[in-house]
Amino acid sequence: MNLTGQQVLPVTQAEAWAALNDTAMLQAAVPGCEAITATGEHSFEVLMAVSVGPVKAKFKGKLQLSDLNPPQSYRLSFEGSGGAAGHGKGSAEVTLQALAPRETQLAYNVTASVGGKLAQIGSRLVDAAAQKLAEDFFARFRTALLQRHPPPAEPAPTEPATAAPGPSPLPSPGLLARLLAWLRRLAG
């Protein structure tokens, strides 16, 4: 299975990098994630509940970060087992590119394989579940980023300077009508 995509994040490149390396933020953003625990430098143990079609299981897995190039990219290798439900392993390349002061493009390329019951339910269903998981992750991740780094407040619009009250250059319509009526009576 291959999964690629891009997302524009509403934060600086440094803020996006920090968030991608914050286990609490990732745990809250990954659907079904119950725990992410550091087990060493750049290695983690993950526990998550996954549902793919009729297969539902708790998966225990390992993540390893490598090829770190802060704040631009890293490689993520993973493997996990859900007992009788099956197993999976793969890798992901993640890159960050600053587009604007508060816009960073995150690009990812995931290659994974599954076995056991997961492999038996068909690649279309597994691919659709992986795509849905990615969409849900990025929606949650974006919300968490905006809570942690709210956009700067827009400056209040300034009112244009108004002239000091004084006599109106044109008479009011009621006054004009009375003046015209008076002139008609005089002209008779």
Image (cartoon, rainbow, N blue to C red):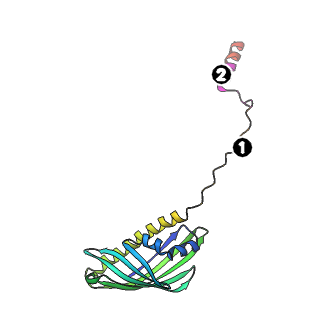
Q: Pick whichever, 87 or 168, lies toward us.
A: 87
Q: Residue at x 69, y 45 (%)?
A: 160
Q: Is residue 170 magenta?
A: yes
Q: Find residue 12 and report its image quarter.
A: bottom right
What label sits on residue 177 in the rendered view? 2
Q: Which amino acid lies under the numbered mark 1 shown in the image of this protein?
A: Ala
Q: Find residue 32 and report its image quarter.
A: bottom left
Q: Is residue 137 magenta?
A: no
Q: Residue at x 35, y 81 (%)?
A: 60
Question: Which stretch is magenta?
Answer: 166-180
Q: Which amino acid lies under the numbered mark 2 shown in the image of this protein?
A: Ala
Left or right of residue 185: residue 135: left
Q: Residue at x 46, y 69 (%)?
A: 141
Query: What is the secondary structure assignment of the residue under circle 1?
Result: loop
- State whether residue 69 appears in this view: yes
Q: What residue is pinned by disc 1?
A: 161
Left or right of residue 155: residue 128: left
Q: Find residue 100 and report its image quarter.
A: bottom right
**Which is closer to the viewer, label 1 or label 2?**
1
Q: Please say if the residues under marks 1 and 2 sit with CB atoms less than 8 Å apart.
A: no
Q: Pick whichever, 86 or 176, lies toward us.
A: 86
The relative height of residue 33 versus residue 66 in the rendered view (above or below) is above
